[in-house]
Image (tube, helix red, strand yellow):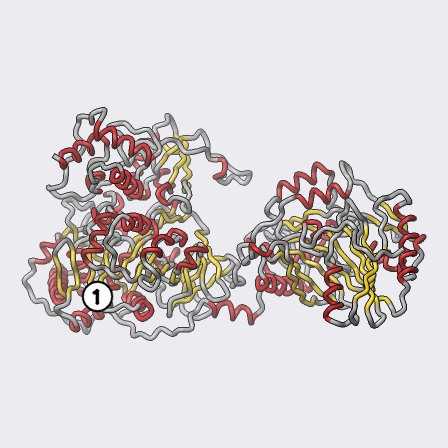
Amino acid sequence: MPRTDFSSPLIPAGSAASAHCHSLRVRLPEGTDPVLLGGLLDKAARAWWGDVSDQLPHLWVEQVPAAADSPMALHRLRSELSRPVHAAEVSLRAVLLTYEDGVADLVLVAHRSSLDATSLRSIADVLTGRAPHSRFRFVTADRPGGTDAELLKRWEEADYSGRAEWACGDDAAGDRTGTVVVPLPEGATDVMATVAVAAGLVLGRYEGQETPVLATLAGAPERADDALGAFDGGGLLALDLTGALGTAELIAQAGPVLSGHGGHCDDRQYARLVAAVRGRVLAGVLDGGLEAGEGEYLPCQTAPFPLTVVPSRTGDGALQLAVHHLLKDVDEASAEQFARHLAHAYGQVNAADSDASPGDIELLDGAEKRHITALGRPAQVLAWQPDRIDSVFAARAAERPDAIALTCEGKSLTYAELDERAERFAAALRAREVQPGERVGVCLERSLDLVVTMLAVLKADAVYVPMDPTYPADRLAYTAQDAALRIVVTTLEDFPGAEGTRAVRPEALAEHDGELTRDTKGQRAPESAAYIIYTSGSTGRPKGVVVPHRNVVALMSATREDFGLTDDDTWTLFHSSAFDFSVWEIWGPLLTGARLVVVPYWVSRSPEEFHELLVDERVTVLNQTPSAFAQLIEADRHRDERLAVRLVVFGGEPLDARTLRTWFDRYPERQCRLVNMFGITETTVHVTAQTVTRREAMTGSRSVGPALPGWYIYVLDERGRPVPCGVPGEIYVGGEGVALEYLGRPELTEQRFVPDPFAGGRMYRSGDRGRLRPDGRLEHLGRLDTQVKVRGFRIELDEIRNVLLDDPTVTAAAVVLGGDPASDAAGVRIDAYVVLEGGDDTASVRRRAGKVLPEYMVPATVTALSALPLTANGKLNPRKLPAPAAPQAAPIPVMAADPSDSVTAPETEAPAGGLGAALTAVWESVLGVPVGPDDNFFELGGNSLFAVRVAAAMREQGLPPLPMRELYLNPTVSGLAQVLEASQA
């Protein structure tokens, strides 16, 4: 008999059970008798489930005081269709909703482990008198090792979900589900299998997977037409998108799994599948009722997976696709995009012949491709006139001849003085027969003459090649040879150049007393090379990036107005001239009439001294790698003096915006603007700009912003096709910043500098991974290859590996990045693993590498193995590498020193107590390893960031101040203790 109370065992909407419940609504004619309907259900239920069953369903009746088409009635119907049942307590819930206008709706709700979609329709036929209950029988199909209910329970408990990187989920959404419906074209022989393949194609592209795994929830196989029964429990479908199979073959493979054939496995096998894909299954394919039938069918009350794809037919028989998405994982816009691309892929798979490769299927139509490529091009047009760097500087010098242009360690040059000294240097270079376009090496410490020499090379219409004098002799010699340098301006007594390379001191250039005037009419055009910066190369040798004058001028034109750069600003040159960030630091102020403060190397190593310089010089524009700025924040926290900085530009490495929260407490956004910029040497320092506010800092935003005016960014797949918004791909950069070439590397140039099919000209294939957001902002997601960033330095791990393999004792080598850059930048290190021909002398391997590689590229650890762990395909298996061995002997960083520098470590050990013991405790605390009196700080894994922590710990414990140069020149406890004690005497 019908029931009018609602005390039946129900599960609250939004529970886990609702993800596995489905429901059917059938509209009944006027005059339907609830008593007769309830009697039919009671009689059928006893026949199907037996008189003794405690799960017998009953008809519940509710009178809705409104017409059937009223908002109240529709809301009540939606609520009833979405109310779940629990399989363990009731097999079926039947509710009759009666309306004021005499119409009624029969709502049937069941758990999939009890009744499938066909069973619901069969029960509806019995209750509406279309078929006798005797036509149907209830069956259960046990599977080996357990029942369907047990397997489905295991399925429910398994964690298949995972936040999609290409979507924006809402953690507060709970189990709320959204739905997107799109039409599908007709013609597919097997709609479910075709949908599954199309869904796998889209998901594989979105997630960058060659073998995406889908969950399949379908009807039981080989069911008799008269059977009411349990759901099969589903299966797992792995699609091979490598191209080994065509789309028709994929459909043929998917069909048996979706129909219940071929997807079966026993309980143990099923458990292994669950474990294998835990956290990887993002989408499931669910049969929504493709057979024509009366009524409204709801295939799932809450999406079982972050994305649940349901093909079905409308009341008039049209084919459609519903994408149910959990809002906590996938937002509405991302779900709409997924549904649109799935339908587009379905149409192609449906129409494709058997030879079609998965890679041939397009996700975007022509209109969306045009929209996506336009997103990476800023609406603001770059208004500028291409020019030479030295010409723009000359204009600034003419405007402000008496203004200070350069400052370093108490000495300054006005714009007029800088211009005159650079002209003198240029004349001296011309007197040494430097020709237009000739490459001139500049190997100088940060000083006034470093900037003077760079400007002089440009005035001589030559190309400057910056080199860091702290680099190993082999690396300097290689650069001189590769760039065919005839002249190198340097203070090194014995520059290790190639045969024919001539070293010239700045003082010699300053002594030139010849004619300084020059004819600028014959100068090379702005499109000609201005400088060449060498970057790490995967072949084992650095490669030179050739950048023209016009690119630097374009960069300043693109940023000047937005950043408010004026002649009132004071900048700093903080970074090595061999690091392309210095291009922005040097020419930024000198091309805008501002003042440039050159930061001596030792000051740049000490956050406290650098902070003092910023205060004293009233610096307003600061450029920092995030690692260096973190040290400055800590130093600023301990000082009362406030900085005058109004603009901080981050570059060189990824920024974790969360580290900036304390900075905003001291320097609000209205006082100091922070800008995160993504850039590449090959695209002239900067490409994008993202203002970082407190909001970005609180959310940990990874956005690097939209492209600069005149620059273009594209995110493309492996075939050079635009990928959808939010989907990762490779970053390409076009526009004004693209460099000319790799010096002397035509094949590499052709590979990386490719035609721009979207805007014309050329674009640079970066090898960086990223995704575009709908607002045109770029999120940088790291590298696609072995390139890494360590404290701002761009490093090819393969270069280090090739240097290791050059060692005659090394037969195999692997290089990986150790530590966690997100949690501790100081702890990031380079770990090397080697197979040695004989013995285990890894210290000598590391020492040899230190003679070729810069200090920042020398592996912190070298671990000897009997063999490198490999995958089944013969590739290195990084996951099988053991923990690195303890750090061993490393080269002490060689810094330029003058006669006033402290002496190196004395032969005597520090006393067991006193300052020596205190230093030992500090080093052990910072480095996390035992420290002896003569152990080298850098050999123990120390680096510049750890050195800052040592200085801070010493300050907190009341120990003598630690000048950074003393640690570098005296890197042992015994030596440093003696020097510090002498300074206190």
350 to the left or right of 842? right
Q: Position of residue 443 (x, y in %)?
A: 20, 51
Q: Position of residue 972 (x, y in %)?
A: 23, 32
13 to the left or right of 781? right
Q: Residue at x 66, y 60 (%)?
A: 323
Q: Position of residue 304 (x, y in %)?
A: 67, 52
Q: Residue at x 25, y 38 (%)?
A: 954
Q: What is the quadrant of residue 820 in the picture?
A: top left
Q: Amino acid at mark 1?
A: Ala
Q: Along the line of sight, which residue is nearer the eye, 206 or 158?
A: 158
Numbered disc total: 1
- Relative to 335, say whether 304 is above or below: above
Q: Along the line of sight, which residue is nearer the eye, 482 or 122?
A: 122
Q: Is residue 751 visible?
A: no
Q: Which residue is mark 1?
A: 594
Q: Along the line of sight, which residue is nearer the eye, 152 or 984?
A: 984
Q: Secondary structure at mark 1?
A: loop
Q: Quadrant of the C terminus?
A: top left
Q: Is residue 57 visible?
A: yes
- Relative to 968, say whether 604 is above or below: below
Q: Position of residue 32 (x, y in %)?
A: 89, 66
